[in-house]
Structures are given as structure tokens and as C-alpha cells.
Amino acid sequence: MSHDMSILQLVLGASWVVQLVMLLLLGVSVASWAAIFGKLFSLRRVNALNEAFERDFWSGTSLNELFQAAAQNARLSGPMERIFASGMREYQKLRERRIQDPGTLLDGARRAMRASYQREVDAVESHLAFLASVGSVSPYVGLFGTVWGIMHAFTGLASLQQVTLATVAPGIAEALVATAIGLFAAIPAVVAYNRFARDIDRVAIRLETFIEEFSNILQRNLGAGPAPAAGAVAGAGR
């Protein structure tokens, strides 16, 4: 009985519908773990790149130099650096069109940074909806396998004249394995989703704060005199 009631024997002895449910849940679990590790490394990289650029931004390097570096390393830059590059690019385009109104220059840079901010947040939130779906749907898929397995087990017992616990237990145990696998897929996905959602909120707040700080620097430079230089020292903003 100990050998017959092992997990492997229960899986092999289950009906084909329950086995299909188990296979689906195992595949979803593998994909979920892949998304978890991918998102973990991605968020670490995003935070590291944002911190590196923020150090350069407040180190006193001119905005022109920072913009040139961001343009050259566009593929390797982080979200904060790309947002900065979007604002500076729009600011310089408006200056090239000989627009001198400070409000127009500032609004254009802010709109460009806001559009870039939305793209960056959407990119950081990728695969988060998948983890939410796995966490909410997997238990019900496992429950479906369990219900089907129990129905199949009781249908097989209908032809027996005498039913004992020994005849009922294997079928019910086979069915319950589907629920266990569903929970195995759902629990890590829910925990990871909550953790990543909190981390992404922190990244978003940090990017919004940078947009406001950079906008304040541009506003002060625009108010300092006509035609402010794009190479104004960023360190003066703090």
C-alpha cells in the first residue's frame, strides 16, 4: 500500500483528464518560476542602472554631457536615463525651433518625460499580469481536476457490491494530487506578484520624483535668464 499510494503511482493511476490537468499545472508552474527569476534579475538591473545614473546626474556633470552619454548608450541605459534623454531631446528640439517661451519649453520637456515614463513603467510591469493569473486561476484548475477525479472514482465504485476505505482512498488521493499541484503553482506566483508589485511601485515613485526634480532644474535655469544653456550643471539643482 505504501508503494501504491506514492505520489508517482497516484499520478500514473489517475484518469487521463486529471493527468492532463496535472501536466498543464506543471507547465504553468515552470513558466511561473521562469517569469519570477526573470523579473527578479530585471528589477535588480533596473535599480542598479537608475542608481548609477542618479549618481552621475547629481555629481555636477553637465546636462549636455549626460545627454550625449545617454544617446550613445541608449540600449544599455536604464529607465531614468531614458526619461532624462527624452526630456532633453524635446527641450533641444524646441530650442532649435527658436522657441523662447519658458512655459512652452518646460511643458514640452515634461510631456516627453511623462510619455517615456509610461513606456518604462509598462516595460517594468511585463509578466506581472501572468503571475497574477497563475496565482488566481491555478487553484481552480487543480480543483477541477480534483472534482473530475472524484467523479471518476465514484463512477468506478458503482459496480462494486461492497465498498471499503481501501477501495475509495486511491481514487480520492489521485484526485487530490491535482489540487496540491495547483496550490504548488499558485502560492509562489502570489507571493512573487505581491513582492514585485511593491518593488515596481517604488521604481515608479523614484522615476516620478526624478521627473519633478529635473523639471525644477529646468525651470530655475529658464528663469535665470534668456536662452539657458542645455549644459547647465545638474548638481546645482540639489
Image (spheres, rainbow, N blue to C red):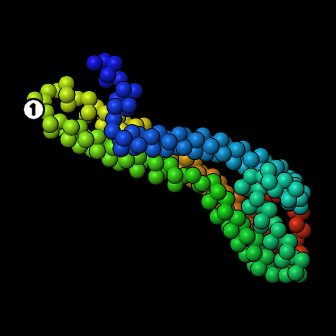
Q: Position of residue 126 (x, y in %)?
A: 60, 54
Q: Is residue 82 left or right of residue 14?
A: right
- Residue at 80% of width from left, 62% of height from top? 85
Q: Amino acid at mark 1?
A: Gln
Toward the left, the furthest residue is: 161
Give the quarter of the figure containing the N terminus: top left
| Left/right of residue 216 with respect to residue 198 in the rendered view | right
Near-viewer residue (1 or 73):
1
15 vs 159, nearest the viewer: 159
Vertical side of 95 occupied by 144: above or below: above
Q: Which residue is mark 1?
A: 161
The image position of residue 113, as x and y in percent, is 72, 66
Q: Quadrant of the C terminus?
A: bottom right
What is the secondary structure assignment of the residue under circle 1?
Answer: loop
Residue 23 appears in the figure: yes
Q: Please indicate, yes or no, whether residue 58 appears anywhere in the rendered image.
A: no
Please tell me how many numbered marks the rendered image carries.
1
Coordinates of residue 220 in the picture (x, y in percent): 79, 68
Q: Nearer the viewer, residue 166 or 204?
A: 166
Residue sitting at the far front: 159
**Residue at image coords 73%, 56%:** 80
Counting other residues with Cα less than 10 Å from the Cα at mark 1, is it few (<14), some (14-19), or many (20 or more)?
few
Could you tell me which residue is drawn at 52 percent across and 52 percent down?
Answer: 130
Q: Is residue 67 above or below residue 174?
A: below
Q: Position of residue 135 (x, y in %)?
A: 44, 47
- Left/right placement of residue 60 relative to residue 162 reads right
Q: Quadrant of residue 116?
A: bottom right
Determine whether, in the image, residue 163 is placed left or right of residue 7.
left
Q: Nearer the viewer, residue 38 or 164?
A: 164
